[in-house]
């Protein structure tokens, strides 16, 4: 596998001939005491906030490997580099049958803390420009493992969608000296037709231009660029965020059995390179958030193949339906 850069859109793509992996017989590798358990990278004991012990492990079939250098090189006009990076599995619970939305707020807080700590740790590695957490749940999202897990990747490049957001937020800031996310949230809260829940510190809402039906975002009300800094700070409102994530996922699960969840946070600003100059206003202009994209039935695939997103349920109707669901 190698990373190749599209010379026109400047997006990096993983290209290579995949080796077919035989199904792993036997027990779940992520259940306690598994013989075939992957290497554990970090464990968080839940003593302080009451969740169980949870761990980050090396992905059994990683897309990126931690060893070596990216060796970015030219092939004529093209750019390519090795798939250096990190690919971890965040085991959300020691229990095989408890998903995030069935967990207690303490357990979800625990998971958020582990995620934040892993991101901070990987950002200490100056080869990595971006670290993110994501979760692919359900058959239509190509869920990989039965055990309730999320994944984390550290990459030597900023992934395409985040790069678009970062560039756009920077441009907006250069023009207005304001954060585009704060401005959006301000307007949405004044006329809350697309707001699903507005709490003291966090909000869930269906974005104005949803890419798929029932797309929903979670973000802090106060301006915060970095998820990991915010979550590990003393002033974090972890249990409020945990409760919002739990209820939001319950809402999503009552609409669809599959979804993609992704965390968008600031790139690695420890990088002492042109990147740092380029992102010098990022703490003012970017605002972390979690995006959840449900996958609705047979219409799922074309969303991502089409050139223009077409959402057949408006954000306002989606938010209204979400609000009306009876959620604990
Ligand atoms: Zn398991
Ligand atoms: Zn903001
Ligand atoms: Zn985003």
Image (cartoon, grey):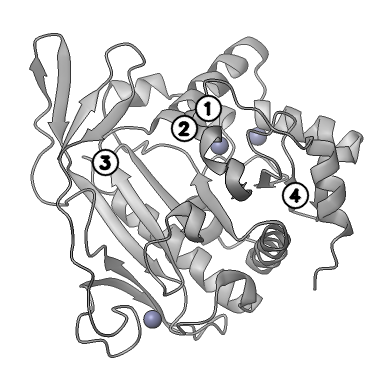
Contact check, label 3 and label 1, Cβ < 8 Å: no
Q: State whether residue 142 appears in this view.
A: yes
CA gap, disc 4 to disc 1?
19 Å
Residue 231, quarter of picture: bottom right
Q: Secondary structure at mark 2?
A: helix
Q: What is the CA distance from the residue labelled 2 to the residue labelled 1?
A: 5 Å
Residue identified by numbered label 2: 162
Element carrying mark 4: strand
Q: Which residue is the site of mark 4?
A: 203
Which residue, given by chain and number where applicable, does mark 3 sit on? 128
Residue 80 vs 234, above or below: the answer is above
- Where is residue 13 drawn, in percent x and y? 28, 31
In the image, taking residue 181 as reference, residue 306 lies left or right, namely left
Q: Residue 93: horizontal and vertical position, in percent?
A: 47, 78
Q: Is residue 48 above or below residue 161?
A: below
Where ligand 2 lies, by quadrant?
Answer: top right
Q: Position of residue 48 (x, y in %)?
A: 53, 82
Q: Are marks 4 and 1 in contact (CB under 8 Å)?
A: no
Viewer-proximal residue among 184 and 47:
184
């Amino acid at each position: 596998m190698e990373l190749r850069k599209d010379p026109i859109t400047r997006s990096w793509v993983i290209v290579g001939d995949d080796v077919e992996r035989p199904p792993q017989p036997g027990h779940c590798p992520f259940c306690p005491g598994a013989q075939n358990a992957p290497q554990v990278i970090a464990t968080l004991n839940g003593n302080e906030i009451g969740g169980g012990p949870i761990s980050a492990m090396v992905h059994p079939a990683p897309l990126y490997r931690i060893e070596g250098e990216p060796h970015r090189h030219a092939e004529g006009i093209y750019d390519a580099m090795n798939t250096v990076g990190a690919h971890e599995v965040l085991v959300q619970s020691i229990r095989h049958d408890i998903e995030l939305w069935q967990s207690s707020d303490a357990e979800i807080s625990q998971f958020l803390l582990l995620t934040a700590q892993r991101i901070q740790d990987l950002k200490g590695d100056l080869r990595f420009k971006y670290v993110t957490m994501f979760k692919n749940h359900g058959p239509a999202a190509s869920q990989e493992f039965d055990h309730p897990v999320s994944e984390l990747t550290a990459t030597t490049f900023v992934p395409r969608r985040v790069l678009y957001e970062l560039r756009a937020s920077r441009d907006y800031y250069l023009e207005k000296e304001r954060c585009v996310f704060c401005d959006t949230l301000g307007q949405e809260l004044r006329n809350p037709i697309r707001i699903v829940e507005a709490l003291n510190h966090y909000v869930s809402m269906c974005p104005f231009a949803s890419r798929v039906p029932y797309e929903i975002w979670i973000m802090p009300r106060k301006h915060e660029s970095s998820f990991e800094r915010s979550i590990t700070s003393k002033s974090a409102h972890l249990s409020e965020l945990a409760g919002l994530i739990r209820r939001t996922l319950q809402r999503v699960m009552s609409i669809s059995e599959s979804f993609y969840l992704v965390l968008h946070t600031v790139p690695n600003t420890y990088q002492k390179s042109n990147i740092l100059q380029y992102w010098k206003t990022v703490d003012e202009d970017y605002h972390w958030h979690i995006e959840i994209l449900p996958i609705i039935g047979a219409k799922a695939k074309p969303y991502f193949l089409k050139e223009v997103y077409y959402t057949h349920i408006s954000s306002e109707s989606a938010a209204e339906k979400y609000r009306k669901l009876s959620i604990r």
